[in-house]
């Protein structure tokens, strides 16, 4: 992809690396988790060397994902604090979905939808971590009552399903809004893209 030297930097190399560690670990943990969830998905365990290795690797991948996401959350939480403008954006999001985003509220680096996704993922990660500890048989589940472990298993499965759905929305939106994916590949976006989708951030970056 040809890049313009006048493009705006949206993410640093370390921020992109952090994002991809979270993304790749999520894919691996989703595949291994599905293999353990239902017999229909059991063939996926072959990707990890069989059922035993899948059961061993899955929770460690979970720890990697949670720690990586926590690092990312520390980087970006201030930029994801909801404002009245974000709520107004959410109320009018249907206009954007229908292809008319020219009269949407002026957004900073992230819009209301992106911020809601961020906080939803924070909650999901916390619940997955706590419930994952409860059901991690090799190290922790023996310290908790059986009823608590069973509840942890239900919560873990339910939250995992929600998180998979959220990530699908995240990926779809990145593909749907043309010019977005390059921000995580190269760290830059075009000026027209920034001006159209995140005008307040564009003004902050360019002074225009």
Image (tube, rainbow, N blue to C red):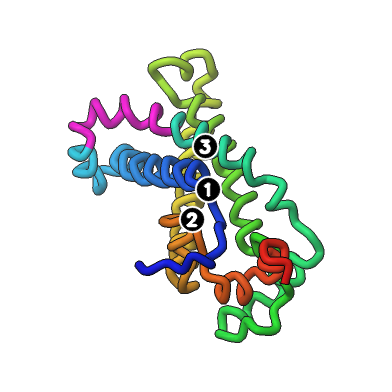
Give the CA separation, mark 3 to mark 2: 29 Å
Please tell me how crowded label 2 is: few (under 14), some (14-19), or many (20+) other residues with Cα within 10 Å. Answer: some
Q: What residue is pinned by disc 3?
A: 128
Q: Name the element at disc 2.
A: loop
The reply, left or right, for residue 201 in relation to residue 58 is right
* CB under 8 Å between discs 1 and 2: yes
Q: Name the element at disc 3.
A: helix
Residue drawn at x 57%, y 76% is 192
Q: Position of residue 32 (x, y in %)?
A: 31, 39
Q: Position of residue 81 (x, y in %)?
A: 74, 52
- Which of the labelled discs sits on residue 137, or is there none? none
Residue drawn at x 52%, y 31% is 67
Mark sitting earlier along the chain (1/2): 1
Q: Position of residue 73 (x, y in %)?
A: 61, 41
What predominant SS class does the magenta segment belong to? helix
Give the CA separation, mark 1 to mark 2: 6 Å
| Residue 112 in sight here | no
Residue drawn at x 31%, y 44% is 31
The foreground one among 158 and 91 is 91
User: Which quadrant of the structure image shows residue 196?
Assistant: bottom right
Q: Name the element at disc 1.
A: loop
Q: What residue is pinned by disc 1?
A: 12
Mark sitting earlier along the chain (3/2): 3
Q: Position of residue 38 (x, y in %)?
A: 30, 43
| Residue at the right extreme of this rendering | 84
| Residue at the front extreme of this rendering | 5
Q: What residue is pinned by disc 2?
A: 187
Q: Quadrant of the N terminus?
A: bottom left
User: Which quadrant of the structure image shows residue 195?
Assistant: bottom right
Span shown in magenta: 48-62
Give the CA separation, mark 3 to mark 1: 28 Å
């Amino acid at each position: 992809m040809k890049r313009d030297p006048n493009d705006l930097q949206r993410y640093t190399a370390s921020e992109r690396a952090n994002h991809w560690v979270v993304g790749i670990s999520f894919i691996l943990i989703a595949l291994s988790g599905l293999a353990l969830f239902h017999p229909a998905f059991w063939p996926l365990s072959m990707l990890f060397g069989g059922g035993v290795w899948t059961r061993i690797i899955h929770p460690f991948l979970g720890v990697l994902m949670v720690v990586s996401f926590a690092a990312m959350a520390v980087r970006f939480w201030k930029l994801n604090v909801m404002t009245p403008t974000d709520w107004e954006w959410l109320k009018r999001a249907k206009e954007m979905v229908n292809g008319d985003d020219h009269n949407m509220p002026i957004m900073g680096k992230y819009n209301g939808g992106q911020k809601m996704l961020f906080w939803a993922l924070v909650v999901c990660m916390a619940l997955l971590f706590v419930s994952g500890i409860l059901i991690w048989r090799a190290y922790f589940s023996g310290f908790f009552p059986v009823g608590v472990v069973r509840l942890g298993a239900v919560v873990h499965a339910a939250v995992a399903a929600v998180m998979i759905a959220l990530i699908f929305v995240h990926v779809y939106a990145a593909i749907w809004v043309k010019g977005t994916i390059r921000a995580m590949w190269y760290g830059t976006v075009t000026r027209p893209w920034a001006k159209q989708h995140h005008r307040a951030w564009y003004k902050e970056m360019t002074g225009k």
